[in-house]
């Protein structure tokens, strides 16, 4: 059933588990994520970035909202990294139940003003809002303290920001970054900083750039002909610790992309004569579903629907 992001995340933060926000750009990813959620009896957030909206258009948004309405578990349809008020309005018009306005690259006052404007519009139509404070960027442990501070979320600023904007959940910067290269080896995650933020911000907290980039998946992608450098992601134990400290929404996109693409390459490589898309998109869909199920187990959202 289609619910707001806050309906899912408020319970998750209160009960100490995480809920996956999985990005989708097409039918196969959408089916894989929803089938996994129903099989695991887990709430789930279907996330569409502006790039996904551009790529899939109404064919994607209408399908996602309709399937979310019919789902047997709570599903929120979420705009990921909305860059403007207009972009948020577009998602609201499409029936999204959660929107992110990402003005984390602006100065504090601009971020407050723009976020507040979006909160007013979204709340007026019963939709909940994710905001972001702090810059998502992997940090090496040796990074100078003041430079780290400039990048990562400041706990006291976060408290003031949430009070002034009325946003419903907050994306924090504690050392993760988007994509497959999150830092050399095991990326440094600033859990003490997260604990300080969580003490001052009772709202659900969001972790972007949370993919694990598991080595077995990287190897499978390479073995199927994919080219990828020294990729690394967020260690499962660091995710579990972040959830215990207040993270309720965990964004995963890269792991799904790697799984899907590895299987497409693998299937086509094994069957050079194949040109029926169902024959290589089908196995790729199954691979995405397995990744989503394993992420739900890690987050603790299984059986919480
Ligand atoms: O936090 C994440 C994903 O993190 P991950 O890379 O660790 O999976 N996201 O918000 C996904 C961002 C996807 O944007 P686009 O469609 O423009 O490429
Ligand atoms: Zn993100």
Image: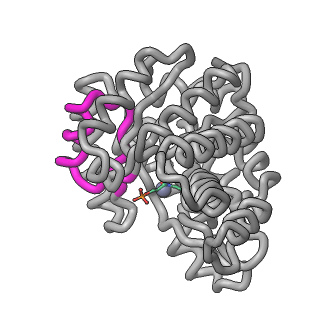
Q: As displayed, is residue 295 above or below residue 93?
A: below
Q: Inspect this view and state whether residue 207 appears.
A: no
Q: Quadrant of residue 72?
A: top right
Comparing 305 with 16, the one in front is 305
* Residue 82 colored in magenta in the image: yes
| x then y, percent, for residue 29 | 51, 41
* Residue 290 colored in magenta in the image: no
Residue at the right extreme of this rendering? 237
Comparing 16 with 287, the one in front is 287
Q: Residue at x 41, y 17 (%)?
A: 69
Residue at the front extreme of this rendering? 273
Q: Residue at x 63, y 76 (%)?
A: 228
Residue at the left extreme of this rendering? 86
| Extent of the magenta region | 81-102
| x then y, percent, for residue 84 | 23, 53
Comparing 293 with 77, the one in front is 293
Comparing 42 with 138, the one in front is 42
| Colouring used for the render | one colour
Q: Residue at x 63, y 18 (%)?
A: 305
- Whether residue 124 sits left or right of residue 279 in the image: it is left
| x then y, percent, for residue 175 | 63, 66
- Whether residue 63 sits left or right of residue 13 in the image: it is left
Q: Inspect this view and state whether residue 55 appears.
A: yes
Q: Residue at x 34, y 43 (%)?
A: 165
Q: As displayed, is residue 230 above or below residue 297?
A: below
Q: As displayed, is residue 144 above or below residue 32?
A: below
| x then y, percent, for residue 120 | 24, 35
Q: How many numbered circles are shown?
A: 0
Q: Quadrant of residue 144?
A: bottom right
């Amino acid at each position: 059933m289609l619910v707001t992001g806050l309906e899912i995340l408020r319970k998750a933060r209160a009960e100490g588990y995480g809920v996956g926000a999985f990005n989708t750009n097409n039918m196969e990813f959408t089916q894989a994520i929803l089938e996994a959620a129903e099989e695991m009896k887990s709430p789930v957030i279907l996330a569409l970035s502006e790039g996904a909206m551009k790529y899939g258009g109404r064919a994607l948004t209408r399908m996602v909202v309709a399937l979310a309405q019919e789902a047997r578990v709570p599903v929120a349809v979420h705009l990921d990294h909305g860059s403007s008020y207009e972009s948020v309005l577009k998602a609201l018009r499409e029936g999204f139940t959660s929107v992110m306005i990402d003005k984390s690259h602006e100065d504090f006052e601009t971020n407050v003003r723009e976020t507040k404007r979006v909160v007013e519009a979204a709340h007026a139509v019963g939709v909940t809002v994710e905001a972001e404070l702090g810059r998502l960027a992997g940090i090496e442990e040796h990074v100078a303290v003041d430079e780290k501070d400039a990048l990562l979320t400041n706990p006291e600023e976060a408290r003031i920001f949430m009070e002034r904007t009325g946003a419903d959940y907050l994306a924090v910067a504690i050392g993760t970054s988007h994509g497959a290269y999150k830092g050399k080896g095991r990326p440094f995650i600033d859990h003490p900083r997260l604990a300080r933020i969580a003490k001052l911000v009772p709202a659900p907290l969001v972790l972007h750039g949370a993919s694990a980039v598991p080595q077995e998946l990287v190897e499978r992608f390479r073995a199927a002909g994919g080219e990828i450098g020294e990729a690394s992601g967020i260690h499962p134990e660091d995710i579990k610790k972040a959830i215990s400290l207040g993270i309720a929404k965990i964004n995963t996109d890269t792991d799904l992309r790697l799984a899907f693409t590895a299987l497409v390459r693998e299937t086509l490589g094994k069957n050079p004569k194949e040109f029926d898309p169902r024959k290589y998109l089908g196995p790729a869909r199954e691979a995405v579903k397995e990744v989503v199920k394993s992420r739900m187990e890690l987050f603790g959202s299984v059986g919480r629907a």
